[in-house]
């Protein structure tokens, strides 16, 4: 899976690339509009991550170029502007998602994977992690071939975990993933805790190994070691 | 009242008064001239009469066959120098009507006796003359006034046309376009001045507005980008497993603080955007529908605290406002009611045509209720909330005809949103 990262802040681009590379993606980073345009025209990518504000251009124009050359890449726009108009515009011109800075790397990974899943619809519609099988078209979860009935939030949480295997996830990142970033109620950590407790119980009840590990003070990690 | 109507009203009022004054004055002058003429003729006839008496020593009616022309009467005890002019009506036996005459009476001595002699002259011709002169004069004057009036209207329309053009473009002026009004050069000095002042002013407003907007946008970008970097680096750090628990706690602190900083910054940006009036698009917002949707979104949080929520939609509370701001307003009011609630508490929302009341149970306030809507006023300074929620609510209300009040009664915090008379 090839991902192009277009972000003028070199450190941030590098950080995103490092995180995605660890997850098994092949990443390329460019820091300005011109080289981004060149790359887009020369190669094909499964997913393109575009910053709106570039020193020599606007990210929206890159999205329009991608649409013009009928590239099949998934497109995620990242922007420092949390403006509704920008969100609407980016979706209108054909990008798949819009993420406001600052964002959590785990959230970006989850969004990239979600887009890739949607893009390769013809192939598999399942993701597997050992004995857990998630069918994301029917939104069902099977453990050792038996179905585990999960609530919407528990399902979202599991999918988020499975998009970030072996990654330490912080509580704020998880809470924002489940409830959005405009909800800053302190209660959300308690609620997160109870959702995790329920998810863990439902999975282990069906004979699943407990992959959800607590990390002291930080949050959780979904891992098999 | 329109400019034309106002000037026309004064014009009509003034010209009517002038018209009446000129009419009356003209009538009086003509009348005076006619009387003078008639009296002069009467004086000539008196001389003729006296000459006749001197020559003949007597008066002979027969040489004057005109009826009532000269009449002799006994003098009585009138003085010798008695001489007056007066108006009188005499009966015309052919026309069967009274006819106006001017009469000159004086004392004359014929032989031994003194007589009061009255010489009369009919005013009928003179009156006809007076009437026709005055009438013609008034008609000519009326036509003149009417023409002047129409002409003035036509002229005013042409002269004021640039003013109306300026007014129209001022009405159409939109700050969002980022430039001042484009006004053309005018021939009339004052309008030209007006246009150039307006152009300068709106140019400046548009420039200031654009630079302010750019500043807030750039500030957002400049601050959010380093925050994004801090966040992602911290997340990478967290992935390392060779930290001590204490170091992990520090990293966690950095992480949470940077998230908090970013939210704080977003909230402050929102406040300044409201201040700058950067929310234009307005639609009628039905609060009941929005509150119902928002409550569904917050359902989990409500359930988590086991809160009982009642919504009493007495009448539809509708406000013409920006949808984004309405959403922020409702979210802040509801999350505020949830956050400061107690477990198993209540939230009561009541809507009437003019008020929206959100009441929630909770511990009494420890801060001054009057300062509740100020920025960073929090119940507990250490609490996780930003302390900007109600400041934002207040700011949004200030931008619309809405008023917000806080009451504490029976361990229930009540926020009342009221529509004010301001349209």
Image: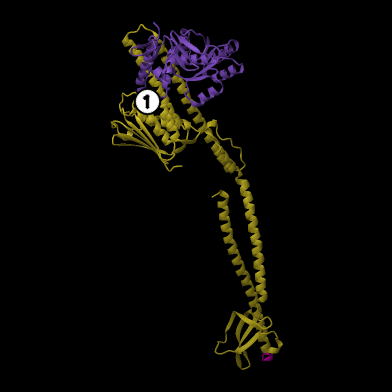
Chain colours: A purple, B yellow
Q: Residue at x 65, y 64 (%)?
A: B137
Query: Please, which chain is the residue tagged with disc 1 on?
Result: B
Q: Residue at x 44, y 20 (%)?
A: B224
Range of residues picked out in magenta = B56-60
Q: Secondary structure at mark 1?
A: helix
| Residue B150 in the image, given as x and y percentages of width and height | 64, 53
Q: Foreground residue, A160 or A60?
A: A160
Indicate whether residue B58 is drawn in magenta.
yes
Q: Which residue is mark 1?
A: B301
Question: On the picture, is B415 further left or further right than A7?
Answer: left
Question: On the picture, is A40 further left or further right than B411?
Answer: right
| Residue B14 in the image, given as x and y percentages of width and height | 57, 58
Position of A220 relative to B419 (above/below)? above
Position of A217 relative to B68 (above/below)? above
| Residue B184 in the image, given as x and y percentages of width and height | 61, 37
Position of A59 relative to B142 (above/below)? above
Q: Residue furthest bottom?
A: B112
Indicate whether residue A163 is drawn in magenta.
no
Question: On the picture, is B195 further left or further right than B318?
Answer: right
Q: Foreground residue, B104 or B260?
A: B260
């Amino acid at each position: 899976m090839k991902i192009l990262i277009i972000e003028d802040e070199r450190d941030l681009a590098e950080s995103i690339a490092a995180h995605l590379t660890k997850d098994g993606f092949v990443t390329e980073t460019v820091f300005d509009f011109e080289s981004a345009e060149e790359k887009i025209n020369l190669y094909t990518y499964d997913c393109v991550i575009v910053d709106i504000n570039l020193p020599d251009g606007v990210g929206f124009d890159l999205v329009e170029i991608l649409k013009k050359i009928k590239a099949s890449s998934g497109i995620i726009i990242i922007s420092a502007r949390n403006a509704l108009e920008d969100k609407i515009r980016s979706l209108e011109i054909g990008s798949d998602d819009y993420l406001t800075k600052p964002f959590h790397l785990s959230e970006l990974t989850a969004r990239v994977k979600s887009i890739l899943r949607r893009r390769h619809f013809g192939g598999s519609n399942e993701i597997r992690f050992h004995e857990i099988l998630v069918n994301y078209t029917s939104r069902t979860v099977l453990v050792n071939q038996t179905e585990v009935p999960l609530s919407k939030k528990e399902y979202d949480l599991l999918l988020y975990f499975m998009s970030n295997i072996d990654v330490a996830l912080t509580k704020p990142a998880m809470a924002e993933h489940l409830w959005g970033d405009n909800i800053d109620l302190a209660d959300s950590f308690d609620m997160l805790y109870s959702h995790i407790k329920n998810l863990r119980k439902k999975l282990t009840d069906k004979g699943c190994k407990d992959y959800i590990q607590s990390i002291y003070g930080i949050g959780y990690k979904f891992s098999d070691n | 009242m329109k400019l034309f109507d106002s000037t026309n009203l004064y014009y009509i009022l003034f010209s009517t008064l002038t018209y009446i004054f000129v009419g009356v004055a003209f009538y009086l002058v003509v009348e005076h001239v006619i009387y003078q003429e008639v009296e002069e003729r009467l004086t000539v006839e008196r001389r003729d009469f006296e000459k006749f008496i001197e020559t003949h020593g007597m008066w002979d009616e027969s040489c004057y066959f005109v009826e009532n022309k000269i009449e002799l009467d006994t003098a009585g005890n009138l003085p010798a120098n008695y001489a007056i002019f007066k108006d009188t009506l005499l009966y015309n036996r052919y026309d069967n009507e009274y006819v106006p005459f001017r009469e000159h009476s004086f004392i004359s001595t014929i032989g031994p006796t003194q007589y009061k002699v009255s010489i009369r002259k009919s005013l009928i011709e003179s009156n006809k003359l007076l009437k026709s002169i005055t009438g013609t004069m008034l008609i000519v004057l009326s036509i003149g006034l009417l023409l002047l009036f129409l002409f003035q209207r036509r002229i005013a329309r042409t002269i004021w046309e640039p003013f109306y053009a300026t007014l129209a473009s001022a009405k159409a002026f939109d700050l969002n376009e980022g430039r001042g009004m484009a006004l053309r050069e005018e021939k009339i000095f004052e309008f030209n001045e007006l246009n150039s002042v307006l152009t300068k002013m709106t140019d400046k407003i548009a420039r200031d507005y654009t630079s302010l907007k750019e500043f807030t946008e750039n500030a957002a970008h400049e601050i959010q980008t380093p925050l994004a970097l801090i966040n992602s680096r911290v997340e990478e750090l967290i992935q390392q497993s060779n930290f001590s628990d204490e170091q992990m706690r520090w990293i966690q602190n950095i992480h949470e603080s940077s998230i908090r900083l970013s939210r704080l910054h977003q909230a402050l940006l929102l406040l300044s955007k409201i201040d700058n009036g950067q929310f234009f698009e307005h639609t009628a917002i039905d609060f009941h529908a929005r509150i119902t949707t928002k409550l569904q979104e917050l359902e989990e949080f409500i359930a988590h605290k086991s809160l009982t929520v009642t919504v009493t939609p007495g009448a539809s509370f509708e406000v013409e406002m920006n949808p984004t701001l309405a959403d922020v307003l409702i979210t802040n009011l509801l999350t505020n009611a949830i956050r400061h609630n107690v477990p198993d508490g209540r939230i009561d929302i009541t809507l009437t045509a003019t008020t929206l009341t959100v009441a929630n149970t909770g511990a009494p306030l420890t801060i001054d209720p009057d300062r509740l809507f100020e920025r960073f006023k929090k119940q507990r300074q250490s609490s996780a909330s930003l302390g900007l929620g109600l400041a934002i609510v207040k700011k949004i209300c200030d931008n619309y005809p809405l008023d917000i009040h806080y009451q504490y009664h029976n361990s229930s915090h009540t926020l009342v949103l009221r529509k004010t008379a301001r349209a």
